[in-house]
Image (cartoon, grey):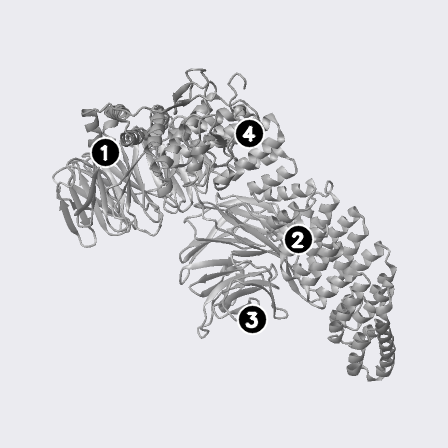
Amino acid sequence: MLKKFQRQRVFSLQEKILLGTPIQFTWQRTSGNYLAVTGANHIVKIFDRHGQKRSEINLPGNCVAMDWDKDGDILAVIAEKSSCVYLWDANTNKTSQLDSGMRDQMSFLLWSKVGSFLAVGTVKGNLLIYNRQTSRKIPVLGKHTKRITCGCWNAENLLALGGEDKMITVSNQEGDTIRQTPVRSDPSDMQFSMMKTDDRTSATESTISVVVGKKTLFLFNLNEPDSPIDLEFQQRYGTIVCYSWYGDGYIMIGFSCGIFVVISTHIREIGQEVFQARDHKDNLTSIAISHTLNKAATCGDNCIKIHDLAELKDMYAMINLDDENKGLGTLSWTDDGQLLALSTQRGSLHVFLTKLPILGNACSTRIAYLTSLLEVTVANHVEGEPPITVSVDVEPNFVAVGLYHLAVGMNNRAWFYVLGENVVKKLKDVEYLGTVASICLHSDYAAALFEGKVQLHLIESEILDAQEEREARLFPAVDDKCRILCHALTGDFLIYGTDTGVIQYFYIEDWQFVNDYRHPVSVKKIFPDPNGTRLVFIDEKSDGFVYCPVNDATYEIPDFSPTIKGVLWENWPMDKGVFIAYDDDKVYTYVFHKDTIQGSKVILAGGTKVPFSHKPLLLYNGELTCQTQSGKINNIYLSTHSFLDNLKDVGPDELRQMLTQTLMLKRFSDAWEMCKILNDNAAWNELARACLHHMEVEFAIRVYRTIGNVGIVMSLEQIKGIEDHNLLAGHLAMFTNDFNLAQDLYLASSCPIAALEMRRDLQHWDSALQLAKRLAPDQIPFISKEYAVQLEFTAKVGELLSHVSSPKIHLQYAKAKEADGRYKEAVVAYENAKQWNSVIRIYLDHLNNPEKAVSIVRETQSLDGAKMVARFFLQLGDYGSAIQFLVMSKCNNEAFTLAQQHNKMEIYADIIGSEDTTNEDYQSIALYFEGEKRHFQAGRFFLLCGQYSRALKHFLKCPSSEDNMAIEMAIETVGQAKDELLTSQLIDHLMGESDGMPKDAKYLFRLYMALKQYREAGRTAIIIAREEQSSGNYRNAHDVLFSMYAELKSQKIKIPSEMATNLMILHSYILVKIHVKNGDHMKGARMLIRVANNISKFPSHIVPILTSTVIECHRAGLKNSAFSFAAMLMRPEYRNKIDAKYKKKIEAMVRRPDTSEIEEATTPCPFCEFLLPECELLCPGCKNNIPYCIVTGRHMLKDDWTVCPHCDFPALYSEFKIMLNTENTCPMCSERLNFAQLKKMSDSTQYLRTEVEQ
């Protein structure tokens, strides 16, 4: 999404005195509070960051240069017609003068990055190093012979300088020269940085980069002074305007024609263009990088464009400057990235806000948030109140809002405002006893946290006829040795947490402490709900808990991420117990279930992705209000509350998922509406069970009545009036068949005998007997008798069972054994009864043997069994296994929801990919990844469900790190789609039409292959090979042509002659190395002669190839050939590039030519038997092109014919045999090969078809 910063122009300087000439400006280092600006008016003016003039420095002439020291305390300025350096102190607002002692005009000035050294250079090349700490001046005469124009310091206090004498010098802080190197043209824009080496151990800034002659970038490594690197760029880019280092050894370079390029300095990819874009159509005047924001800005053509360094191809924002008609100047960011300044050619200067501190606060449903550096907006959208903007006097560090007031402040001061209807009145300012960390307001009171203390005070003293002691109080008490780390204010309480782990509740109405809770470790953050009856706190281990002061109980929050930044409680009055925890990327919805039959607990309901740099402020009925970096608010709907949308067009599967959400959130009325739409028994039963679980008896009766379950309605009617919580919960647990829980609850209730009655009614005689001993000894005889009868029966049955085949009897026996708790015997009986689901259940619930359960599920493919295993793994928190078994049980929707909630979509996707999956499943996975902006995965699954257009869109959006795979997949998509529109879209992308960055031509080749357009593929292969050849990558070029040749051959398409010729020449070049390595100089020389005769095809290595040809010919006794190529090397364009080792020898060959030559052997043409030189491939007799041997490069002979079994290219059998003594691969296709695989061919006619026959 493209953001516009237009309304965030903080100020513009358009002073008449500056207009008409270009201006210089510089931001104060570190804080960016001041901006120094000067033009052709002999004055440097200093403005604050809001555009107010704070000071000025009058100079005798125009300013030559100015620079702030490393801390931003001192601004140094040099001017024409003066030998003084002017020093303006930002702390005292005073200017002093330092006499440089230099006789000639000063031309350059720069403070050290780390020390208090100031370097000053002059037009005659002299240097002064001034140490401000010791006031010592070191003059260095003759450092350069002409004007010093540029320079830089590194972190070790080395000073590099460049001058019009075309020299670069490196000096220490004493001024001694320790390195120097000449450059070809005038140096400018010099910087020190770290170039990346293979070992990556060097952490010092040892590389100097400098622009030379506005055309090349020169890299000089102090550790390798003899091998500097000169990087040249394409002519069409224009001249280098400026550049900046960033990240892991990358350089961004801006060019005059509107293009910027990113190159890497890693030694393996030095100078390689990692990225290139045309940001501006006609010109580019400046680039600036903010390391704090991780953003880059470029300007030109009346606009500024901002890119995210992590995702350069996407434009992050754009600022238009339509009123600037003379062109733009220089860009510069403050160190904190908040402000971006731009000068223009006509002398104006504009300052834009690019990052606003995200400061905001909420009280009830009212929010306050920073909308500009000096503006806070207060709004209450829930109550429908119009927003009010408040202009404040300082840039605040903190903002707080209460029911009727607003507080903003910085350091130890806070300014309070009264919020009236549509008006805001400044009330007062308060000074606290230390720097305020945060402040909270409610109706009448404010509480400020500073330096481990909290001050509670009335906001307006006259509001209450308060006794004096109730106006203010400082916490903790003097004798309480603790530091307060966090605090909050509700309508009734001040609550705070300390480093000793205590959470204190102070009741404001009674002006006394009412509650304290002691936690084992310190409490870092607290977040009370709107009433103060529950509170979430985060401790120093980053664990989260819900605390209930009413019963002094804490409940750990499950799956609580250590990266959580804050918590918000739901403000909608009907949704008590819901809260969210958020970090930088995600919001997690939790629900505190206070009353369930299993007691109180916190559950995670789901997660919602939040856009970049959104800070949550308020949660109301599932709608999250967030604050953004640009000073606006944005509303996001939680994924856990999707049921609040219109349900008209929602399908049944989605409705079931939403029903699960509503039940988690205890929104039974919403669940009721969904059950009415679904109108199936399963949904009603799920709602009824949830009501029982949450002890909502009245609602459960209503549901059971609707589905006609009379028995349970009557049972619930009988118990609904029970006030004993445990007794009621026990009954409900029994209704849900959780008998062990029911027993525990009955025993803890006022009627423990109910546990015995339940066990007796269930005929659980063993348990009943144990309970009777404790609760009702008089019932022991009756229970013993019944138990004995059952034992007698099961014993007899047990003896007879081996002779019984009826599954029903085995089943009865299994149930009896299970009721007795004899699970091993029960499981055997269930197996005999073929009741696999019961077998699986017992292995999981009672025998704790999930491995056995899993193997039975895999064996029997039982759907219900898979569900049980999934539930088991879900309780263990092993979501991957749970998803696997949900898919096996055909519960794809539940598996999908689980994957979504726990960020396990890749696991789900992998599992589903191996099943018989429907297009709907693939589509839902694709839509999930689309929402997460994971383009590669989204594209993959859209492709699987046949949505080719959407798949292609995502593959083309993939980040550059996934580029290769994404383009491969895009090609596969277009190949499957066979749609002309998609084909042309992809071709545009590959040609760089969309982003100005042409992709590697190999992808175009693969696209044509996928589309079976072999002729276009052939043409592209020739172009790729030509480019690889031009770059000197001969093996790559060879392999491209070979693979295309083989493809065309397999498709029975005629091989273009240019392709065949190029492959032959490249292959000849590759054979040279093999022959020379094996000491066969004659074969090497013959191949080199062929290559040298086509030297224009090897532009990167003309001189080395010709040199090798001369040497090999000389060794092989081909003296005449050696002489003719040596003469070629004597041409002026080649002569100086000859390797010094061979230069004299070659010159001697030309001076004293030896024209003797060993005659080349002749062998017969396989077509017409004409005798011709063995390396000649065109027969003068029959005019046929003769196939060549891939081992020697000679023409083939009819009676010595073999072919490579892998690539089918011909070779001389006798020669191939010899070669395989030393090599083990085919020289053409590089496949492994041994002598046994070679077959001598008696008939070679199929390889000897003439071109006419083909």
Q: CA distance from mark 3 to mark 1?
A: 88 Å
Label drawn at residue 884: 2
Looking at the picture, which amino acid does disc 1 mark?
Tyr
Q: Residue 526: which quarter of the image?
A: bottom right
Identify residue for label 3: 517
Observer-nearest residue: 43 or 281?
281
The secondary element bearing badge 3 is classed as strand
The answer to whether residue 3 is visible is yes
Looking at the picture, which amino acid does disc 3 mark?
Tyr
Q: Residue 1035: which quarter of the image?
A: top left
Label drawn at residue 1009: 4
Q: Nearer the viewer, mark 3 or mark 4?
A: 4
Identify residue for label 1: 1142
Residue 65, x across and y down, in percent: 24, 39
Picture residue at 75% right of the left edge, 74% below the top = 749
The secondary element bearing badge 4 is classed as helix
Q: Is residue 643 left or right of residue 179?
A: right
Q: Nearer the viewer, mark 1 or mark 4?
A: 1
Q: Is residue 191 left or right of residue 419?
A: left
Observer-nearest residue: 1185 or 1162?
1162
Q: Earlier in the sequence, mark 3 or mark 1?
A: 3
Q: CA distance from mark 1 to mark 4?
A: 46 Å
Looking at the picture, which amino acid does disc 2 mark?
Gln
Looking at the picture, which amino acid does disc 4 mark?
Met
Q: Earlier in the sequence, mark 3 or mark 4?
A: 3
Is residue 1244 shown above or below 569? above
Q: Nearer the viewer, mark 2 or mark 1?
A: 1
Q: Earlier in the sequence, mark 3 or mark 2?
A: 3
Is residue 419 shown above or below 1134? below
